[in-house]
Image (tube, rainbow, N blue to C red):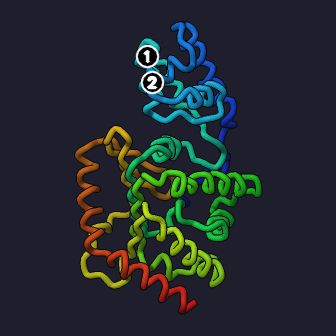
Amino acid sequence: MAVEGAVGTGGEPDSSDSLRTFGAVVQALREHAGLSREEFGERVRFSRHTVASVELGRRMPDPTFVERAEEVLGNTGALRKAAGHLARQPGLAAWFRQWARLEATAITLYTYECRLIPGLLQTEAYARTLFTNQLPPLDDAQIEAQWVARAERQRLLRARPNTAFGFILEEGVLLRRTGGVEVARGLIDHVLEIAGLRNVEIQVMPQVRETHAGLDGPMQLLETPENTWFAYCEGQRGGLLIPDLREISVLQRRYARMRSQALTITDSLSLLERMRGEL
């Protein structure tokens, strides 16, 4: 079973080196252009604090920052190329990093899952069950790094109250009781708590369903602050970021159909509460 955004056997390169190097390049180009951090921030429409965090290697720059910085600093292409080699931190797979950067600033994020509970909704106990049962096996440091990375991503749900999050979960994923009864009970409690957030909608696709638009597998869709859409699909050993608008349109139509095929939000919560009571 694929584990969302997980590393393989080799771990990830040290994030601090790549982030500090990228930041140093931004700072050098900014100073060469004769701009203060405040002036540069005004031109790229990011705060002085954000500029400083990027230059000091403390923050992963999102794609919008990179593109605007390129335009302000001469369109040399250096920042675009360097951004492709950035590592956010151990625990995020190389093929997941670009999606994670987009996810961090998205204004809309839709997720359909049929294999496991999405990473943004997982409890620590559930996530560690996935990590400890991964093949090839991970060592303790890799498991810890993966949980730290996942916990950081989960902060998005509360840190971005103006972002609309939508999830469609297969009933069978909840019925599987991954990790045992106690883990499953804690997981459903957590999902119900997250469902109480104003910016989160959770629907359950019933186990018995004669028609289903998502049989080709899981998908994620997001909208950037510039109203550009991206899609992401993940398999056993990798993930695919999809920028093609025609492909995204197909996935959007499928997701829209699934929303009508799944239980309503109210009925989904009632089902979750009933499942919780049966554990």
Quarter residue 48 falls in? top right
Q: Is residue 115 above or below residue 189?
A: above
Q: Where residue 72 is drawn, which disc sits there?
A: 1
- The residue that mark 2 highlights is 44
Residue type (three-letter) at the residue carrying disc 2: Val
Q: Is residue 172 above or below residue 163?
A: below
Residue 221: percent from the left, percent from the top? 36, 53
- Secondary structure under the numbered disc 1 in the rendered image: helix
| Residue 95 visible in this rendered orientation of the protein | no
Does residue 266 appear left or right of residue 145 in this picture? left
Q: What residue is shown at x 48% (from left), y 89% (from top)?
A: 274
Pick whichever, 34 or 229, lies toward us: 34
Residue 62: percent from the left, percent from the top? 49, 35
Q: What residue is shown at x 45% (from left), y 79% (from top)?
A: 172
Pick whichever, 169 or 161, lies toward us: 161
In the rendered image, the quadrant that contains the C terminus is bottom right
* Callouts 2 and 1 close, C-beta under 8 Å: yes
Pick whichever, 258 or 228, lies toward us: 228
